[in-house]
Amino acid sequence: MTDDPRTQLIDQLKLARAEMIALLDEIDKNRKIYPLWTIREILAHIAGWDDAIIASLSAHVAGREPGTPAMRGVDVYNAETVATREGLDYDHIYREYIRTRDILIDLIGNTPLDKATQPFIMPWGEQGDMKSLLTVFIDHEFDHAGDVRKLISDALNA
């Protein structure tokens, strides 16, 4: 095991993603997971947050002030991430979901260690370092996977 926080974060991001991907073939793509969201919207939502993290971390690494796309609130940003992908089919969103995570993992791996530990502005306007930012979204994906897993389990036990 390494003490490099970048490697640990990459491993956790991959684990969270693998957990969600393992559930995708088991869930009905049209089943509502949340009142207005199917698995398609959840993947669009997660890809949207990956976009925000990539933009924020890229700006930080380049020495620029990161933008704050979620400054108006997490719920507003969540709605926007799904709405901007509204006309896209499931396969397109799935490819984007995979691609954005690959880009994020490459970015983390190429972030200089000093930049990885420096605080910067996160997408919602608070300060934090790379670990604090990514820990939120690692847990976030695990939470969504847990909700999907519960629905699958409930359907099997019904």
Image (tube, rainbow, N blue to C red):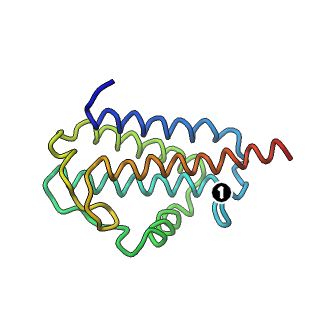
Q: As rendered, which of 39 and 149 lies closer to the eye?
A: 149
Q: Residue at x 15, y 59 (%)?
A: 64
Q: In the rendering, at what x and y percent does residue 19 appear?
A: 56, 37
- The residue labelled by disc 1 is 38
Q: In the rendering, at what x and y percent does residue 104 appear?
A: 35, 44
Residue 92 placement, left or right of 107:
right
Q: Residue furthest bottom?
A: 72
Question: Which type of secondary structure does the marked residue at label 1 adopt?
Answer: loop
Instruction: Tell me which amino acid carries mark 1.
Output: Thr
Residue 30 placement, left or right of 71:
right
Q: In the rendering, at what x and y percent does residue 40 appear?
A: 60, 54
Residue 146 placement, left or right of 121:
right
Residue 66 placement, left or right of 141:
left
Q: Residue furthest right?
A: 158
Count of numbered marks:
1
Dot 1 surroundings within 10 Å: few (below 14), some, or many (20 or more)?
some
Q: Indicate the quadrant containing the N terminus: top left, top right, bottom left or bottom right.
A: top left
Q: Residue at x 70, y 45 (%)?
A: 27
Vertically, is 17 above or below 67?
above
Vertically, is 86 above or below 117?
below
Q: As rendered, which of 60 and 28 lies closer to the eye?
A: 60
Q: In the rendering, at what x and y percent does residue 68 appear?
A: 30, 67
Q: Residue at x 65, y 57 (%)?
A: 38
Q: Residue at x 43, y 51 (%)?
A: 137
Determine the image quadrant of residue 157.
top right
